[in-house]
Every structure is written in C-alpha cells, then in structure tokens.
Image (spheres, rainbow, N blue to C red):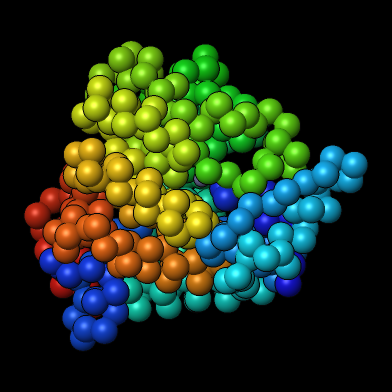
Amino acid sequence: MRFRYTFLLPCAWLAVNAGEAIGQDRRLPVIDMHLHAMAASSQGPPPQTICAPFSEFPVWDPASSYLETFARIGESRGCEHPVQSEPTDDALMRATFERLERHNIIGVASGPLEIVERWKSANPDRIIPALLFSLSDSSPSPEMVLEWADDERIAVFGEVTIQYQGIEPNDDRFEPYLEMAERADLPIGIHIGMGPPGAPYIAFPSYRGRMHSPLSLEDPLMKHPRLRIYVQHAGWPMLDDTLALLYAHPRVYVGLGAISFGLPRVEFHRYLRTLVQAGFGNRVMFGSDQMVWPGVIDVALESIDSAEFLSAEQKRDILYNNAARFLRFSEARIAAHHALH
Ligand SMILES: [Zn+2]
C-alpha cells in the first residue's frame, strides 16, 4: 500500500437516504458540492492509497523526515480501509462517472479547466463545472474568471485553496476575486478546514492550524453583502467558530467534503450531529471531495446513511435540498434532476 504524496493538491485533501436509495430502482438525486475533475497523477504517481476513513492520525518523531511517516500512512494501523486511486485519467473519469450513475449524483466538479470541460462534455447531465483556484503568478485574473463565468464555462468559483498557501480570505490579494464573485453573483466554495495531516511538513509550510477557523470570512462577508459562499470541509475541527459563523451569517452554508470520508466515523458524526442539532441542518451540504479515489464517494455517502441521529428529511436536505437552494436551482432544473435515474 502506498500513500506517498497523497493530498499534495487540494485537498491537497427522497425522503429516502442514500443507503436506501442504492437498493432502489429509481433513486432520488444527490448533489455533490465537492467533486474534483483532476489528472490521475495529481496526487502523485498512481496508484496512490488513501485511508477512508482514518481511524488514527500519524504520530511523528522529528528525528526523521515527516515525509517518511506520511509515506507509510497507508500501511499504518490507522488505515483499516485503504482506497486505491485509478491508474489513468480516463480510468479516473470512468470510475467517477460510474459512482455518479450508481448513486444518482450531480457533482460540482472543480479542477484544471481543460479537464473539467472534458468531463462536462462527456457527462453534461451530471457535471456542474467549477474552477479549482489558488493564488500564484499563474492564477487567472478576476477578469478572466468573470469571463469564464459569463460564458458559463464555470458555475462555481472554487474550490478556492488559498489556505494551503497560508492566505486567509480577508487577505488583500484575494479581495479582487471576492469583488468579482459578488458582482457576477458567482457562488464561491472555499477550503477552510481539513487538509492532509501534518500539512505544514509536507509541501505547505505556510499552512497553519488556526486557519481552520471560518471566522476569517466575517470581514469579507460584511464588505460584500451579496456574496454567496460555502465553507468546504465545514471548518473542521473549529466547531464553535463554525457555529458562530452560521449563527451570525444566515447566508453562509457549509459543505462536508473530506471530513465525510477522512475522519474517524465517530468524530465525523459528532461534528455533523452538533451542526444539525444546533439548528443548522438547513445549511449543511453533502460533498465527497473525491480527487483520484472514486471509492471515497461510497464512503462519504455511507457516512450520511449511517447517521442514525438524522431523520430522512434531514438527510434529504443534506444530500440535495440545501445545495439546490444555495445554487438557486429553478423548479425546472430540480424536476430534471428528479427525472434522472
Ligand atoms: Zn479542500
């Protein structure tokens, strides 16, 4: 089992629920707010192994390189359920589509634009195009992103992965993009929360644990009153900060993302249970954060299915209704999704 460079890129890491749906002839639709359309080699040379879920995170003695510890994660006792990546770009796309069909998923898929467009043209009913974004010298300008949005080449600006670069959303360098997204009414998905364990010691020296707090969104929210934004990975583990953000800013949503397959299941359920029981079940959205391991989609859906504290109605909200509201889908579009099977 290998897990060498896993997560080097972002996330770099019905009144019926998904589990019941799997066994039905006609399954109600699911919206995956955090899918990726990436190269098979985007997380390192395939095959790569990921733990879905982890049952224990790494312990590291700094006498050695963390990369050595990280490379052995897939062989560790914390990795009871390893999932393998696909060998080629085409195999990755096909295996992902197979999951989308099996579970009746429509996915907001982000990645390099050329790959997103290939996936979109291969499966137009199930792929909603989105732009994977980080700040660098080669980043598209706000004007370029706006043009892509106007041309309907992207419907969501995100996953925005600036946390990996140590840049918070209230940074001056990101401000022009917030201004553009508000002006264009382009929803933003931003990575705030779970990355790979030990991220600062892998390839992201500016990454900080304190940046898991989504309260860094407060000033941008007040500066841009019409901005639509969702917090991917739900700000884990900053539960109190996430609750405060949701309470103070009723327009903010959270996506579950990697926490739905990566966290020890008890911890994921603790976090999700509190979000819902605190009164925010109408703003939690399913996301798989599938990158190169299509099998994590099954695990992510099962983590909702097995949440006994959720009612069937709450599961439908998380799996479809909240995302349809956030994305402002028309009744016709919702009806079209419900005609898919
Ligand atoms: Zn992410």
Instruction: Name the image quarter holding the N terminus.
Output: bottom right
Q: Residue furthest right?
A: 63
- Locate residue 107, reporting x and y percent: 36, 59
Q: Nearer the viewer, residue 335 or 168?
A: 168
At 25% from the left edge and 22% from the top edge, which residue is drawn? 248
Q: Is residue 102 left or right of residue 133?
A: left
All told, the count of numbered labels is: 0
When the figure is inspected, residue 139 is found, relative to residue 266, above or below; the finding is above
When the figure is inspected, residue 262 is found, relative to residue 226, above or below; the finding is below
Instruction: Name the image quarter holding the C terminus.
Output: bottom left
Q: Is residue 198 left or right of residue 228?
A: right
When the figure is inspected, residue 124 is found, relative to residue 35, above or below; the finding is below
Query: Could you tell me if residue 57 is visible in this image?
Result: yes
Query: Could you tell me if residue 290 is visible in this image?
Result: no
- Locate residue 131, reporting x and y percent: 47, 45
Q: Is residue 204 left or right of residue 212?
A: right
At 53% from the left edge and 43% from the top edge, which residue is drawn? 194
The picture quadrant where one finds residue 235 is: top left
The picture quadrant where one finds residue 283 is: top left
- Locate residue 66, reporting x and y percent: 80, 46
- Locate residue 94, reporting x and y percent: 50, 76
Q: Nearer the viewer, residue 164 or 95?
A: 164
At 37% from the left edge and 68% from the top edge, which residue is drawn? 302
The picture quadrant where one finds residue 42 is: bottom right
